[in-house]
Amino acid sequence: MLAKKGVIPYRYPVSRNQYPVSRPNEAQTSLYGDEAVNPKNIILRAIAGLGDHFILIQAPKQENEIRLSPALNRVPENLRHIHLLGICGTGMASLAGMLKQKKFLVSGSDQNIYPPMSHFLKALSIPVLEGYRPDNLHPEPDLVIVGNVITRQNPEAVELANLRLPYLSFPQALRHFAMKEKRSIVISGTHGKTTTSALMAWILEKAGMDPCFMIGGIPQNFQTNFKLGKGACFVIEGDEYDTAFFDKGPKFLHYNPWVTILTSIEFDHADIYRDLNHVIESFRKLIDIMPPGGLLIANGDDSTITAEIKRAKCPVATYGLSKNGLWRAVDIAVQEDATRLTILKAGKEYVSLSTPLYGRHNISNLLSAVVLADFLKVPCPALSEAVKSFKGVRRRQEIIGEKQGILIVDDFAHHPTAVKETVEAVKEKHRDRRLIAVFEPRSNSSRRNIFQVQYTGSFEKADLIMIPEPPLMQNIPPSERFSSQRLVKDLKKKGLEAFYFPDTNQLIEALVNKAQAGDVILIMSNGAFDNLPHRLLERL
């Protein structure tokens, strides 16, 4: 019965990111193959497992689905014109800027073009074509860089295959064009990558080390998220998200790390990871490629991390707010203008610092940067000055403005842990003011119900909570969808004041009506959120 439906047993385990290269009647003897080299006439995908026997099902080939030739995954000679698919992503836009700085002719295309990246690219005079069309690859560029937002059914990806043009993924291109001959400092982890990367880049800048960097946000000290410095170090935000449709491994495996900071490991990115163990597998690979002469800086407060760092072949330095780390932060005092703390190394005072950062998560991020600064022999006076003068990152507890005595703060938080830590940090800083927390469930994970229960513990420090309907739900099966209405009901059961809104316009009206002088409105989303922070500021 199953065989008639194309479902057959297979004796080897198959992960979601692997496809056996075979026909159904060859499955028992087939070898694994990468997506890029699978036959065009069939795809076999693992759908269930029992012991070491997996069940495979034949999936029909989609119209316009293409396979890029691995032989063309290279940098051509006589390179001049480079075209970027998905150019308005934060990383892709920054790469475009780097390539422009290196005197290449750069163009790109994207479906959704909006600030800040649209303004960023316009300022660099990089032409951006709105919408994906085959004509965008005519005249033919010498090289195409494919962002991970691009699917194999994308019209330009199809044309790329038809034209047989050379191509690279974003991390491949970054490593080739910007990171060669540099010492790679990879900032990795589920949380805190952007703030830690920005702070580390600023510390090296203030120490006169002229770093290179690429960061997934805009550091306020630089007003750009990339720099091609002349120094030896390249600070890169190492993302565990997949590389491209032809390479489903995490981006950070391409960056040849010399030093890695590992801030945290939690389940996230439910669109590409099955569960926490699947996430851990990726970070294990990162730990395994660390060179013996490098350094792994690991959060000793994270039990998942402490279990995994035992496999490291390089030296490991642990840090934390508990007593588990070689490096610790103690005597933390939150004041109106700054957070003050003392750093201990092996139980002895190393340095006292003052920082504009708030929240335990940010103190942990700061601590990891101090460990790295020590490894790079940054003098303590330069370290102290950099930490004190660090202005943060756009969309990380960023103050949008204050009007009628109402302060608007914008943040990128979307994972339940990040939302909880951000709410607590903002309340800690503004403890005498009413906190209105507004959260848009927008990420690929937060739009699914995997975190439905966890979010009920993320808002306990908020005085008023507003949750809109999640956007972009059409591609998520109904049984897997997150429910804002259910979250609001669950928050009310805990005695919290929470409200649901079917759209952004009604949410804005409620905020305008309910906000009072002295309030802090914290807006959290990993997307544009219909430009809510600035629209609200105009309405107040």
Image (cartoon, rainbow, N blue to C red):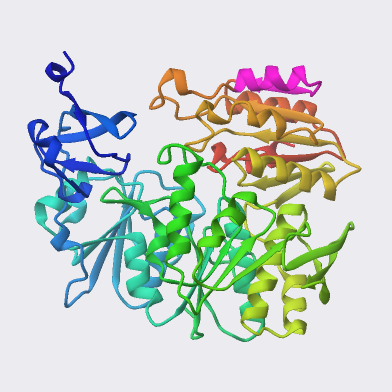
Q: Is residue 118 left or right of residue 428?
A: left
Which residue occupies the extreme front position in the image? 51
Count numbered badges in the picture.
0
Residue 331 x %, y %:
89, 63
Task: Give me the residue at 72% from left, 75% from top.
Answer: 386
Quarter assignment of residue 106: bottom left
Residue 140 is at least partly visible in this image: no
Residue 149 is at least partly visible in this image: yes
Q: Quadrant of the N terminus?
A: top left
Residue 41 x %, y %:
8, 36
Residue 287 x %, y %:
48, 62
Q: Quadrant of the C terminus?
A: top right
Q: Is residue 87 above or below residue 50?
A: below
Q: Is residue 335 above or below residue 492?
A: below
Depth order, front residue of 275/448:
275
Q: Is residue 277 left or right of residue 13?
A: right
Residue 539 x %, y %:
70, 36
Task: Give me the residue at 62% from left, 71% from top.
Answer: 200
Depth order, front residue of 50/529:
50
Task: Give me the residue at 63% from left, 74% from top.
Answer: 372
- Residue 495 falls within the magenta-colored stretch: yes
Which residue occupies the extreme top position in the image? 1
Q: Is residue 94 left or right of residue 6?
A: right
Magenta highlight range: 484-500
Quarter assignment of residue 177: bottom left
- Residue 337 falls within the magenta-colored stretch: no
Q: Is residue 56 above or below residue 163?
A: above
